[in-house]
Amino acid sequence: MFFRPNPRRTLVAALLCLFSHLCFAQQLALSFDDGFNPEAHPGARQWNAQLLATLEARGIQAALFPSLARLGNGAGLELLGAWAQAGHMIGNHTASHRSLAAPEVSLDGFISDVETADEALRGLSTFVPMLRFPYLKEGDTLAKRDGMRAWMKRRGYRPAPVSIDASDWYYNRVYAGHLAAGETGKAGQVKQRYIDHLLDRAAYYDGLARRVLGRSPTHVMLLHTNQLNADALGDVIDALNAKGWRVVPARSAFADRLYDSPPDTLPAGESIIWAQARAAGIPCLRYPAEDAVYEAPRLREAGLIP
Ligand SMILES: [Zn+2]
């Protein structure tokens, strides 16, 4: 039996492809850090299920980077199984979630932290040897930065940087506080401002990328496993789509050559776009690139924090 291409169907497919490229100018993948701890947060199992249900409903393959310290006493490890079962890639975010930029954290201590997490996570079916540095900090000295890069090369590890950084952890803290106080109206306003914040950061880092790289790469956005994302993810994806963003699988995003070009900066880390811009001498880059201090004044002005 021979398969004959149907000219009409081919034309429709070509038009659809062209249309989707016109509609979606930029691409990004979603990555989630930390993992849930059901012992610390009674809602963790439900939030985990909500995130996975939204990703499944949208047909999105994301990446998860768990840190053992954020999973509680093994209870959070169980929840990772559902991510693997759904096909999401799982990487390494260290055992104790320490910053390599902290002077008291040695290179050897950090490496053993990565190895401990590797042993605990490697058995998951979708595990990939990729490292997401806690706080996106990749070392405060050349010896630590380059020592870690050399270790990763020897051990077949790839870095898993983000290109779009944001402060979802801070919005989550404010959002959860309002919900706990029964202030659902205020929580809803925080959620809306959070979606605007992500759109703003996506546009900012894409603009910076076009300036530094001369192109729009396949971005990787940093998010965390938290209550706000569990509640808002569907709306976040809708808002991104409406602004011309297409969400692509995390695996294909990391294939972009951007993620294999370690920037020459110290302290090392932040968004890889930010670091490339710093290395290229682009002025007026704030440090840290993202933080609560930039977001709090807006929420205060709107009466959403004291
Ligand atoms: Zn983290």
Image (spheres, rainbow, N blue to C red):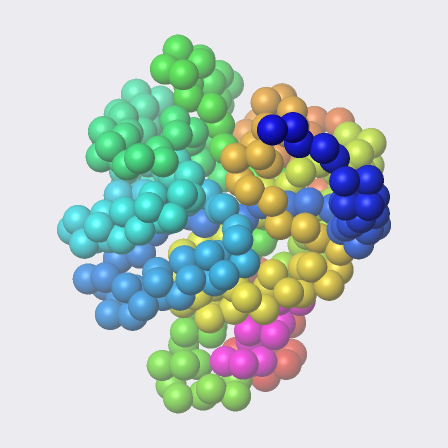
Q: Is residue 276 above or below residue 136?
A: above
The answer to which of 87 and 74 lies nearer the viewer is: 87
Q: How many marks?
A: 0
Q: Is residue 189 magenta?
A: yes
Which residue does the image show at 35% across and 60% down from the upper left?
Answer: 48
**Residue 242 visible in the displayed image:** yes
Q: Nearer the viewer, residue 227 or 293?
A: 227
Is 218 situated above or below 183?
A: above
Residue at 49%, 46% (x, y): give it.
61
Q: Position of residue 53 (x, y in %)?
A: 42, 62
- For residue 197, above or below residue 100: below
Q: Quadrant of residue 93?
A: top left
Q: Nearer the viewer, residue 12 or 121?
A: 12
Give the extent of the magenta segment. Answer: 187-196
Is 239 positioned to the left or the right of 125 in the image?
right
> Residue at 60% of width from left, 61% of height from top?
237
Q: Is residue 251 magenta?
A: no
Where does residue 128 sit, x and y in percent of width and height? Answer: 39, 30
Quadrant of the image occupied by residue 301: bottom right
In the rendered view, tell whether residue 43 sits above or below residue 200: below
Quarter of the N terminus within the rendering: top right
- Quick one: which residue is furthest to the front in this view? 1
Q: Position of residue 216 (x, y in %)?
A: 76, 38
Q: Is residue 289 visible?
A: no
Relative horizontal placement of residue 234, taking residue 301 as reference (left or right): left
User: Which residue occupies the extreme left position in the image?
Assistant: 73
- Give left or right: position of 168 versus 298: left
Which one is in front, 306 or 7?
7
In percent of width and height, residue 156 lies at 40, 16
